[in-house]
Image: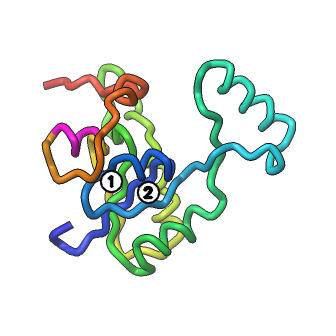
Amino acid sequence: MEKGYVLVDVRPKEIYEKAHPEGAKNAALFRKFELGNTSFSGLLRATALALNGVSPVEPNPAFVADLIAAAGKGSKIILACEAGGSLVPNASFQYGKESRSLKAAYKAVVSENFADVAHLGGGVYGWYKADLPFVGEYDLQNVGRTPNIVNDD
């Protein structure tokens, strides 16, 4: 961030507002599921998620516009989600570990609206563990919900 990058937290707004890295902006990649804006298959998916104790969400169709509003068109951005992700294969994830921030990075790159797009490895949890400046109180309940990457060191 000291090099002119804007840190953008892509987690849902409600989670971002509870706690986030100091200086981070928010542009949610997913939004809360809205009954009126879905197909029958979307309704089935939302029901399955809810029955499994997961709050149903759907892609935010305005994500790129929200990202531009948060960071500014032409800016350099770092995208962060809860646990990060990785493009590097390892023992647990043969093709790397998918994450919201990596999906967001893809959308940002193909939109061609940003000077540079980076990804925060380790995510917001990694930021918190590194004892970097934080706003609010981090909720450790989300930590176990996202599988961590096995370290091959």
The amino acid type of the residue labelled 2 equals Ala
Q: Amino acid at mark 1?
A: His
Eyeballing the image, is 119 above or below 125?
below
- Mark 2 lies on a secondary structure that is helix
Q: Is residue 51 left or right of residue 85?
A: right
| Figure coloring | rainbow
Residue at 34% over, 47% down = 19
- Segment tinted magenta in the rendering: 125-129
The answer to whether mark 1 and mark 2 are in CB contact below 8 A is: yes
> In the rendered image, which residue does mark 1 sit on?
119
Residue 73 in sight here: yes
Whether 51 is drawn above or below 102: the answer is above
Q: Is residue 81 above or below residue 143?
A: below
Left or right position of 3 against 53: left
Q: CA distance from mark 1 to mark 2?
A: 7 Å
Residue 133 is situated, as x and y percent measured from the top left of the image, at: 17, 53
Q: Does 15 appear above or below 112?
A: above
Tally of numbered discs: 2
- Could one spot residue 94 in this view of the protein? no
Residue 105 placement: quadrant: bottom left
Give the crowd class for mark 1: few <14, some 14-19, many >=20 residues within 10 Å: many
Specify the farthest residue to the right: 40
Going 54% across and 67% down the picture, which residue do you hit?
Answer: 66
Residue 6's x, y, as percent?
Answer: 31, 68
Q: Which residue is mark 2?
A: 105
Which secondary structure is most common in the magenta stretch?
helix
Left of 35 or right of it: where is 48? left
Q: Nearer the viewer, residue 98 or 91?
A: 98
- The percent position of residue 71, horizontal first and vertical second, equals 40, 72
Q: Is residue 40 magenta?
A: no
Write the residue at 45% across / 53% down: 10
Secondary structure under the numbered disc 1 in the rendered image: strand
